[in-house]
Amino acid sequence: MLGETADSPASGQNSGASIWAIVRMILVLALAAAAIYGVVFLFKKSAKRTVPDDPFLKVLASAHVGSNRYVHIVSVGSKAWLLGASDGGVNLISEIEDKEIIDSMMLEDSKKTAETPGKLQDFLSVIRRMGVPVKATQPGADELRKRRERLREM
């Protein structure tokens, strides 16, 4: 009305509504940020090591040993080295001379790369990597005939 002042009851209702709108906006933004973080986390968890470009240079094993400090076993051909990596650089720790250990690491690495599918993965492999048991069955001859007939009818 014309005679209302700043300390009238109508202005108190508006300030309460605007505070509630700000609180709602902050909650929605927090939920959106949490959803984005969750999606990024799932993508990182489901991402596997890519196939190396150079088949002769391989990282056979890696271990995190501290804050931004890692230990890697790198092989070139039939030789392998234990390397330490940190923010300060990469240092040679020692050369691995035991041929049996190198061969077993190479065998394990070749098994891992054989199991790793290409960049485009099917949905079942993503579900399996998340820990959900999935039975993938091959369709039988009758099932294939039924599918073929349905396609012909289209």
Image (cartoon, grey):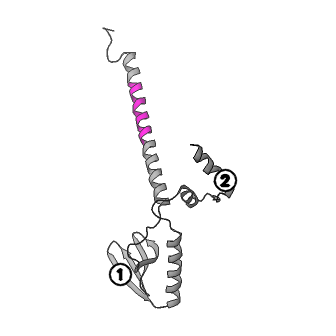
Residue 99 badge: none
For the residue labelled by badge 2, is the local secondary structure a helix, a strand or a loop? Answer: helix
- Total of numbered circles in the picture? 2
Q: On the image, which quarter does residue 142 sit in?
A: bottom right
Q: On the image, which quarter does residue 23 sit in?
A: top left
Check if residue 16 falls in the magenta segment: yes
Q: How far separated are the C-alphas under marks 1 and 2?
A: 59 Å
User: Upstream in the sequence, badge 1 or badge 2?
Assistant: 1
Quarter holding the C terminus?
A: top right
Main secondary structure found in the magenta portion: helix
**Front tag of 1 and 2:** 2
Question: Given the current orientation, which residue lies at the most extreme front position?
Answer: 152
Left or right side of 74 for 139: right
Left or right side of 122 for 82: left
Task: Give, as a single range, the part of the protein colored magenta.
Answer: 15-29
Q: Please, is residue 112 above or below residue 24 in the view?
A: below
Q: Nearer the viewer, residue 105 or 27?
A: 105
Are the residues flagged by discs 1 and 2 in contact, CB closer than 8 Å? no
Please, what is the three-letter code of the amino acid marked with disc 2?
Glu
Circle 1 packing at 10 Å, graded few (<14), some (14-19), many (20+), is few
Residue 91 badge: 1
Circle 2 packing at 10 Å, graded few (<14), some (14-19), many (20+), is few
Please, what is the three-letter code of the amino acid marked with disc 1?
Asn
Residue at the spot 41% in from the left edge and 20% down from the top edge: 13
Q: Nearer the viewer, residue 87 or 49?
A: 49
Residue 63 in the image: x percent, y percent? 47, 74
Residue 88 in the image: x percent, y percent? 32, 74
Residue 92 in the image: x percent, y percent? 37, 84
Residue at the spot 49% in from the left edge and 86% down from the top edge: 102
Residue position marked by numbered label 2 in the rendering:
143
Residue 3 in the image: x percent, y percent? 31, 8
Q: Nearer the viewer, residue 151 or 80?
A: 151
